[in-house]
Amino acid sequence: MYLTGFADEGAAGIDGQIEITKELGWSNIESRAIDGVNIHDLPGDKFDEVAEKLEKAGVHINCFGSAIANWGKSIESEADFEKDMEQVHRAIPRMLRLGTKLVRIMSYAVLKDRPPEDQMKEKRFERVRAIVSEFLSAGIQPVHENCMNYGGMGWSYTLEVLENVPGLKLVFDTGNPIFTDDRTKKAPWPKQDVLEFWRAVRDHVVYIHIKHGKWVDGKMVYSYLDEGADSSIRVIEDAVRRGYDGGISIEPHLVHVFHDPQGKPDPVRCREGYIEYGRRTERIVREAFAKAGRPCTLA
């Protein structure tokens, strides 16, 4: 098993992202944005600079946290699909250069003016199949995240995406169910149950995102894993007990929420918060190994 994280929540530039990763004693970053630009959209010369710095530092990009088919893309838009395929074709050679084996994708934004049974699902499956096929042909594993997209509407929707997209696997995010409507239930939809979702999909999970918090007065309040409900800790413990040996990636959202446009966070607080989150998560993972009676295999 290895620990990694969305280091753009701790530092904007690649130098800072490398620094906080090494301070944690880790060797992996899940790369999303560098100086505010997704790694698959960086200009070529900027990407070359990033790749050289990573190689020199001995830090590996284990996963591209891509924007492909995500909650910002509409299944009704041909332009969005064209943009997705452009991003796929830019991402593949970059991932091959960096030796990156995983890429996070989604299944397009939920159509808010339509009921769950009328979400243009066949078109979604067709487009996600096209995306997945390109990555698999290059030896790269796409992983679908349970976020604000069709597959994230509930565990049955995730399984339906898997059934219709051969070769796709899952990244499970422990925080997303807390603020997401459960459309497997009757309206008005309750929020999802983290552990119910996890148990339904865990056999297909090859990667885990960790964020944590609670739903308060219509918004998500983020916290450390060991504060409040223990759902994220229980997912980690269950995964370790079942022999999970993949990556665990932190996405704290404590100081900086990547997709929140409200102001610029304080860089010192971002750095300190990311490192503290990483240390607490590592302690919890080590305790999970001890509890399961397994030798700790953190790399």
Image: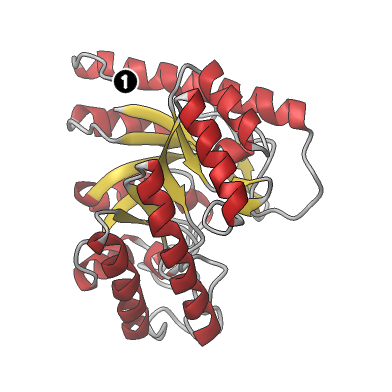
Amino acid type of the residue tagged 1 in the rendering: Leu
Q: Nearer the viewer, residue 57 or 199?
A: 57
Q: Determine whether 24 is above or below 80 in the image.
A: above
Q: As drawn, is 83 to the left or to the right of 36?
A: left
Q: Nearer the viewer, residue 94 or 75?
A: 94
Residue 118 sits in which quadrant? bottom left
Q: Nearer the viewer, residue 31 or 236?
A: 31
User: Which residue is at 63% across, 30% downward?
Assistant: 15
Q: What x and y, as percent, mark residue 34?
A: 62, 45
Residue wearing tag 1: 298
Q: As drawn, is 113 to the left or to the right of 259?
A: left
Number of callouts: 1
Q: Determine whether 69 is above or below 140 in the image.
A: below
In the image, farthest residue toward the right: 263
Q: What x and y, as percent, mark residue 185?
A: 37, 67
Q: What x and y, as percent, mark residue 236?
A: 33, 31
Q: As drawn, is 49 to the left or to the right of 183?
A: right
Q: What x and y, as percent, mark residue 26?
A: 45, 22
Please indicate, yes or no, whether residue 235 appears anywhere in the rendered image. Answer: no
User: Which residue is at 18% across, 30% downward?
Assistant: 243
Question: Tag 1: Cα neighbours inside 10 Å, few (<14), some, or many (≥20)?
Answer: some
